[in-house]
Amino acid sequence: MVNKPSSSNLINSSTGDWEMVIGLEVHAQVTSKAKLFSGAATDFGADPNSQVSLVDAAMPGMLPVINEECVAQAVRTGLGLNAKINLHSVFDRKNYFYPDLPQGYQISQFSQPIVGEGEVVLDMEDGKSVTVGIERLHLEQDAGKSLHDQDPKNSYVDLNRSGVALMEIVSKPDIRSAPQAQAYVTKLRSILRYLGTCNGDMEEGSLRADVNVSVRRPGGPLGTRCEIKNMNSIRFIGQAIEYEARRQIDILEEGGEIIQQTRLFDTKTGETRSMRSKEEAHDYRYFPDPDLLPVEFSQDFVDGLANQLPELPDQKKSRFMTDWKLAPYDAELLVAEKERADYFEEMVGLDADPKSSANLILNQHLGRVNKEGIEFESAPVPAAASAAILKMTSEGVISGKIAKELYDLVWETGDDPVKLVEERGLKQVTDTGAIEKVVDEVIAANPKQVEQVKAKPQTFGWFVGQVMQKTGGKANPQSVNKLLREKLEIGDN
Amino acid sequence: MSKLNDLTLAAARDGLRTRDFSAREITQAHIDAIETGNEALNAYILPTPDLALKTADIADKNLVDGEAGPLEGIPLGIKDLFCTKDVRTTACSHILDGFTPTYESTITQNLWDAGAVMLGKLNCDEFAMGSSNETSHYGSVISPWRRNGSNEPLVPGGSSGGSASAVSARLCLGATATDTGGSIRQPAALTGTVGIKPTYGRCSRWGVVAFASSLDQAGPLTRTVHDAAIMLGVMASYDPKDSTSVDVPVPDYEAVLSGGVKGLKVGIPKEYRMEGMPEEIEKLWQQGIGWLKSEGAEIIDVSLPHTKYALPAYYIVAPAEASSNLARYDGVRYGLRVPGSDIIEQYENTRSEGFGSEVKRRVLIGTYVLSAGYFDAYYLKAQRVRTLIKRDFEQVFEKVDVLLTPATPGPAFALGEKSGDPIEMYLNDIFTVPANMSGLPGISVPAGLSQDGTPLGLQLISKAFDEEMLFRVGKVIEDAAGTLPEPLNWWSIT
């Protein structure tokens, strides 16, 4: 399904509107203990060349043997993308020379990939949904890493990544804006993480994207595309697309022509620059790898994996909307990360109000997590504590204002919120006599303001603030309001 | 008793069991033969006498203890294409200078596990590319055979020329070899030895330097059919480390040797009667037909219509795979490195200097046929031809049990006689290539001598994994041919 040009995605320019056409190739490292064709380990951050088998180093006479877990992971991913699973697929050799490619070829899948067409649905902030088609998913080997900064004259090669299994997930050119591209990568990452087929760690390079960008007049013929290589941040993907589209539009509006090329994004300048043109592109001389048999499995194998698939973000989202009456966007944000969704489910499981739980997670909890720059799962406020805070609030034990402070207190002390409320006397004062005493004091001490509020009822809030301040925020706001209105003789407004 | 290195492998095995002689004695006899003969023949590029004697002593202990393996104490030569742990392995290429593997190929490991003794690494064509053993970085191998009344050096065939020369000249009891387009069978035919290329997938390719992965298959080269049966029984195994290895049981090949051919249907493919084929080859073929007929086989004329396309298709598929397989020799991790001002120049310098001209020719052909715009016309078409060749064989084997053909279009040629003309050289494999293209097993058995007094062989081809048929029928041909003359020993320095 192709998106219709939507006015909100168009780039307005003096010569008329332009539309971006974007497609992505995402490289996702398969979660597996061993490499795609060897038994060497795949752990990140090991000493250089400490995880290299004879096969990975392409020693003479060494042969690849497929790691069946990687095949299962690719099939699981295909199922998660609602894609066609090919029961017969073929590994090909992609031939080129580079020091970090020991065999002189990468084993990949060219004409017969393991997974065919599928789709990913994106829910955008404006409430609209966008469907992005998946062209294919194939398995391939990662290359090693060239180290150019170790010696003034020589380069070194670390082969730890050599042979690690990657899934290349190719989208159709269905994306029409930078936010859509970002949402696509976010959603894809979320699906992979739910499936447990890729950890999605972009900083470690477990998830990287090549972004194809072209521009055209809305509905017109496709323009020439440029490919921005090796993006490993969702934020930079957005920046790179915006820059690249603008660059292309400028060229076209000046009567120039886009040259098909591969470009790199410079994170310092925020610009893309040319890496190589189409003429310099390699002839990869793909042919079926004669060392490997075609990958063949039965529909039963696929069905077995399908039956064990976890609940995926889309399913979870619609369940959250049905069961807990959440707004689509809130549900979308909650299910984007499995840890968030789990946190939410634990809270509502403890009878916390769903809407309030969602608010607490998406505003307070996520805000604090981001501010501290830590992983969601290592936040020191467990779901049970958040649920207890909401429960005390809804039961009137503490005020809304105190609830926010209490959350921060739990974060800092790690203590049980109920205990904290007891120990620190944070309970809401509902004793009318006690509140009335404070109200009287405030009125008596501020005759000028009392005079003023009769003429300008909107200054009423100032009295509420004074009373709340004097009671340390513990006074029940309804009681304060009621008493003040009576004493100041102003009606409900 | 004749000299110990004159024994067949089977006889040596029995003599070792009965302690007529020790493993050390028979090993020493071979070491002596190598010391006096190798300079003239250049069959071994790396003799390993110390290792051989050390292993022989272990074998003797095992023989005494009654723990002898099937090849206990049998001295063998190993083609330099097989990676041998801690023993330099070069595929006879300059580019693998000084490469010493830290691992042992599955096949050689099977041999050592069975008690065999390694005498050294045998010469071959560079990366097994050649039909005369003239492309080796370590120089040409010379055949122990000479034409009647001539001292002109002859080639032993290739690529397993070192294996063939060494077995023929008694520098080992048997040798490992590999066959991508005829590299076991053609040198066997040219040196009066027995060579079998088993079914693709029968022997593991793990640890064997690759030439063309979909065609490469290792096998033994020996002096008798019986010896080949013994050796293949040990070399063959299912190996999970080779994805193309096939998990079928390895039968007792010795048990079928006396089976005879009575009632068997032997196919004679008419397409192997090539235009311009020497009369002596045709005569040899008729002779073979006569032998089998008189032993009770039924002779059936058959047709393999796509035979003539096998060689041209082979010279697309094999170089294509080779161009990719040899990409790993880049001077970065092992072997020869010729530095340059940048990485591209280092690649160019290393590969220009490291590869010989025949290897370069095939890498270039292979790169060309896989290139964008040519892939369909060459590589894809060749693969389709391959399918048709396979189908030809499948249809014929519905009617017959085995095929009988000449092994080569002629006898051994002189050193340098064909090395200037690649096409002429490639035509040597015209009868052997179809078995590689179809994955089927084939054996070359000595059947007579040419007018010049040099050996000629006949080839048998059977169904996949029916090597037993080859041994059974091969034994009948061997017996019918009787004792053929041996080459006169001119090579030993006395």
Image (spheres, grey):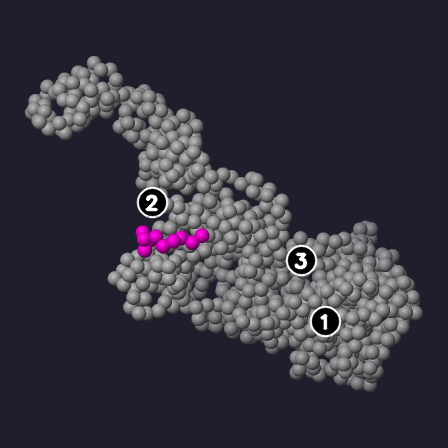
What is the spatial separation of the Cα atoms under label 3 and label 2, in whole angstroms? 54 Å
Residue drawn at the location 55% of the way across and 48% of the way down: A75
Which of the two discs, 2 and 1, sits closer to the camera? 2
Residue drawn at the location 39% of the way across and 65% of the way down: A224
* Vertical relation: A146 (above or below) B373: above
Which chain is home to disc 2?
A
Q: Which residue is mark 3?
A: B244
Which of the two discs, 3 and 2, sits closer to the camera? 2
* Vertical relation: A188 (above or below) B48: above
Report whether residue A309 is seen: yes
* Residue most extreme to the bottom: B149
Report whether residue B319 is seen: no
* Vertical relation: A455 (above or below) B421: above
- Looking at the rendering, the stretch of residues picked out in magenta corresponds to A1-10
What is the spatial separation of the Cα atoms under label 2 and label 1, in whole angstroms? 66 Å
Foreground residue among B11 and B445:
B445
Q: Position of residue A27 (x, y in %)?
A: 47, 54
Callouts 3 and 2 on one subunit: no
Q: Residue B306, labelled with which disc?
A: 1
Residue drawn at the location 49% of the way across and 64% of the way down: A98
Q: Is residue A29 left or right of residue A3?
A: right
The quarter of the picture where the C terminus of chain B appears is bottom right
Q: Which residue is mark 2?
A: A126
What is the spatial separation of the Cα atoms under label 3 and label 1, in whole angstroms? 25 Å
